[in-house]
């Protein structure tokens, strides 16, 4: 990916506060999705539903996010980013609160659709704001901050949510998320800057705007990259925990440590990977991380019985490197589109991520099965396919270009010390 150096002096005023707010938005969105899977047994007992019906509860969130993400691409660039995010995040908070109050399965299904529809698009607006206010030269580090939301959701959000569910029932984590969303919404309304209309308002009508977003050659390469990169991870993640239990011999009570150790390590390394990508070049660091991630990717799909500490080393490396490659990867993707198209582009990008994850998960389920002893078989096939996609992602990243455009929007707030 070719890069361009901004002629405008970058401004750091208020960036840290903005990134902290955006990371908080992502934290609640990610925690809301992650908490569903370990709550499966409680949902099935409470509503008397089958595993297939529970699977629909989980997948409807992604389907709703994908559908609304694509539709939002038509109009997202017509609105001020701050107002769009506040509206969408309020809808997400309302959807999450509806989950907490759901009296039956069908009401919960509707509430999950609402939360996914608003939350998925809100996540894409977060990325668009990063592209608008952070110059390309520091965008990798900024993405590293945003990506810590996944780590915090793993090491803090998930354990707290599960403990609340154990004490007070499955409603409790969603009440917590609703309360957090209200606090973050008020904070965002005060700290996020208004973006000038000329920074992201398209002069085309909605259909022409979408045509440009979908057909521009650089956009197509970026969409392909995010689809391939997402699928490479989605082939592995769904069967990571079952494989560690059935193939590697990890006791179920220790499963949480995979996410605690992996999330804690990724929390620190994501920031470092972002800084490194800004200093050494995003394509170069992306290639290094992608190729290095191939090692634990293959390792987790070939696990045999081993000590707990050895399992945690492998899974921690897997989570650090697979999440780490997204830091320079998303920085490149965000930089590949002009500011006036960025909102719609990131909405479509989010939709493509959701679709790619769903297809990869479905594909992995066709490759993996159980033998008579209960071991997972064929997981290595998903690993090999993931390796092919990793190589393809590196090749695609070399063809991305930094889109021309004006300097990022100045941040009109008081200076804040750098996070961490």
Image (cartoon, rainbow, N blue to C red):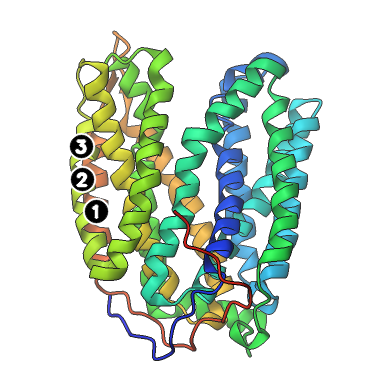
Q: Is residue 406 left or right of residue 83?
A: left
Q: Nearer the viewer, residue 24 or 327?
A: 24
Across and down, in percent, residue 89 comes to 70, 55
Residue topped by disc 3: 298
In the rendered image, the vertical position of residue 2 relative to residue 366, given as above or below = below
Say which of marks 1 and 3 sits in front.
1
Q: Residue at x 68, y 69 (%)?
A: 82
Q: Nearer the viewer, residue 216 or 101?
A: 101
- Asked if disc 2 and disc 3 are in contact, CB closer than 8 Å, the reply is yes
Q: Secondary structure at mark 1?
A: helix
Across and down, in percent, residue 317 comes to 26, 38
Q: Disc 1 versus disc 3: distance between alpha carbons? A: 13 Å
Residue 200 in sight: yes
- Asked if disc 2 and disc 1 are in contact, CB closer than 8 Å, the reply is yes
Q: Secondary structure at mark 3?
A: helix
Residue topped by disc 1: 290
Across and down, in percent, residue 7 comes to 39, 91
Count of numbered marks: 3
């Amino acid at each position: 990916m070719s890069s361009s150096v901004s002629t405008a002096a970058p401004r750091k005023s208020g960036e840290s506060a903005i990134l902290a707010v955006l990371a908080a938005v992502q934290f609640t969105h990610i925690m809301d999705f992650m908490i569903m899977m370990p709550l499966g047994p409680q949902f099935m007992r409470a509503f008397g539903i089958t595993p297939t019906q529970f699977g629909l509860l989980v997948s409807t969130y992604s389907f709703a996010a994908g559908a609304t993400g694509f539709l939002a691409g038509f109009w997202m660039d017509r609105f001020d980013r701050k107002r769009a995010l506040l509206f969408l995040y309020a809808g997400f908070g309302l959807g999450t609160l509806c989950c907490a109050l759901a009296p039956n399965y069908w009401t919960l299904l509707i509430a999950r659709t609402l939360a996914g529809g608003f939350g998925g698009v809100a996540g894409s607006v977060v990325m668009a704001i990063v592209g608008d206010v952070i110059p390309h030269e520091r965008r990798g580090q900024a993405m590293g901050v945003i990506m810590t939301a996944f780590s915090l959701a793993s090491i803090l959000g998930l354990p707290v949510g599960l403990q609340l569910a154990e004490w007070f029932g499955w409603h409790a984590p969603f009440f917590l998320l609703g309360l957090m969303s209200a606090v973050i919404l008020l904070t965002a309304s005060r700290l996020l800057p208004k973006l000038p209309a000329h920074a992201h308002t398209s002069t085309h009508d909605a259909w022409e705007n979408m045509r440009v977003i979908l057909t521009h050659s650089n956009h197509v390469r970026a969409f392909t990259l995010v689809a391939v990169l997402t699928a490479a991870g989605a082939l592995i993640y769904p069967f990571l925990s079952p494989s560690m239990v059935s193939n590697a011999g990890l006791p179920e009570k220790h499963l949480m440590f995979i996410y605690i150790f992996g999330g804690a390590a990724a929390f620190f390394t994501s920031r470092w990977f972002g800084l490194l990508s800004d200093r050494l070049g995003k394509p170069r660091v992306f290639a290094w991380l992608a190729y290095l991630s191939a090692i634990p990717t293959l390792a987790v799909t070939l696990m045999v019985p081993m000590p707990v500490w050895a399992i945690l080393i492998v899974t921690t490396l897997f989570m650090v490197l697979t999440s780490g490659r997204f830091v320079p990867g998303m920085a490149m993707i965000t930089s590949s589109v002009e500011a006036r198209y960025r909102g719609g582009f990131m909405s479509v990008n989010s939709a493509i991520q959701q679709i790619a994850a769903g297809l990869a998960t479905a594909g992995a389920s066709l490759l993996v099965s159980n033998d008579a002893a209960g071991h997972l078989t064929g997981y290595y096939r998903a690993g090999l396919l993931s390796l092919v996609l990793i190589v393809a992602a590196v090749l695609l990243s070399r063809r991305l270009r930094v889109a021309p455009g004006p300097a990022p929007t100045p941040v009109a707030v008081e200076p804040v010390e750098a996070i961490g």
